Amino acid sequence: MDDSNAVSVDMETIYLGGKEHHIRTGRGTVSVIVYGDQEKPALITYPDLALNHMSCFQGLFFCPEAASLLLHNFCIYHISPPGHEFLQLGAASISPDEPVPSVDDLADQVIEVLNYFGLGAVMCMGVTAGAYILTLFALKYRDRVLGLILVSPLCKAPSWSEWIYNKVISNLLYFYGMSGFVKEYLLQRYFSQEVRGDAEVQESDIVQACRKLLDERQSINILRCLQAINGRPDLTDGLRRLKCRTLIFVGDESPFHSEALHMTSKLDRRYSALVEVQSCGSMVTEEQPHAMLIPMEYFFMGYGLYRPYQFSESPRSPLSPSCISPDLLSPESMGLKLKPIRTRVSLQTEKGHER
């Protein structure tokens, strides 16, 4: 690694022994938090709009069973878009004179991060806009991607209604900053109504924490990322050419539910699977991270990766094979090829197992 191109800031006291690297790329500076043994295979994450790894993946990595599965097998590289660093440390407002990056620029930043750390082929996990960036990355650099885990992904160009709405949000960010209207728009993007609450039910802790994080965000940085996503091209035609195994999660209350179904229908059915999570918004990683555990276990088995034995039958997990469609447990989906399936995780069943 060339120290002249990056500055590493020790974040040990903040994120469980992780270390933050600020990597200067040809398309701007990227924050990467590295956690785990760098001798292990790499898993890179990319968050949704206005979020970072703590607000987008904390629920998943703080779930003991999921953490044991992921950290036992991978070194984690949490990539944040420019200006979205952890708790905004060192993330000043990006100058308006700086050119707005395109989604291709953001995908090309990922390859520069991999090259900086000397990584070969990696596993990728992204949420919504982050899922789009990593899918685009996989299409551009196929030999650098082992597999994709996509949560409520985007793959089509924005519709006219989405494009216009994003333009309105962009103007609000530019003139008024992180206003209440913009925050509510983002929270609806991330979470289901159940956790957002209403006049009679208080919003959940994860929504409150996310609302606080949004207050700390630099609006110009979010604006630039939103402009990049709003200019995204349609990836549909290239999806059939993806040969890496792909596991898609989507909440059935996500605004992007239909987009995930569309993407699944265009992927090669031999290599892809869909898991629909009931009563959940877009951020399955935060709202129902346990619902990701068993599908990920069987997905990783195709790569010869397993959870440590002591966690293999943890009573803490609200999921059991009886909660999962038998199709997911079939030999076909445990091998090199996955069947296209739709799995609904029942909250009532989960609660019954928790008792």
Image (cartoon, grey):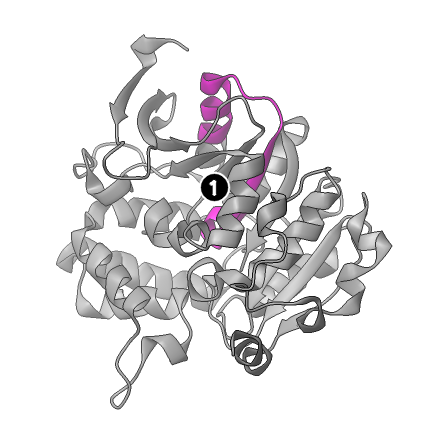
Q: What kind of residue is marked 1?
A: Thr
The answer to whether residue 255 shows anywhere in this view is yes
Give the answer, above or below, for where 301 lies relative to 213: above
**Please, what secondary structure does the residue beneath circle 1 have?**
strand
Is 323 a magenta residue? no
Q: Nearer the viewer, residue 140 or 193?
A: 193
Residue 49: x %, y % from top left: 37, 52
Is 124 a magenta residue? yes
Give the answer, above or below, for where 119 lies relative to 206: above
Residue occupied by mark 1: 45
Q: Is residue 249 left or right of residue 27?
A: right
Q: Nearer the viewer, residue 79 or 139?
A: 79
Residue 119: x %, y % from top left: 54, 21
Q: Residue furthest left?
A: 176
Q: Residue furthest right?
A: 331
Magenta span covers which residues?
Answer: 108-132
Residue 283: x %, y % from top left: 45, 61
Residue 232: x %, y % from top left: 49, 48
Q: Nearer the viewer, residue 163 or 207?
A: 207
Residue at 79 percent of width and 54 percent of height: 333
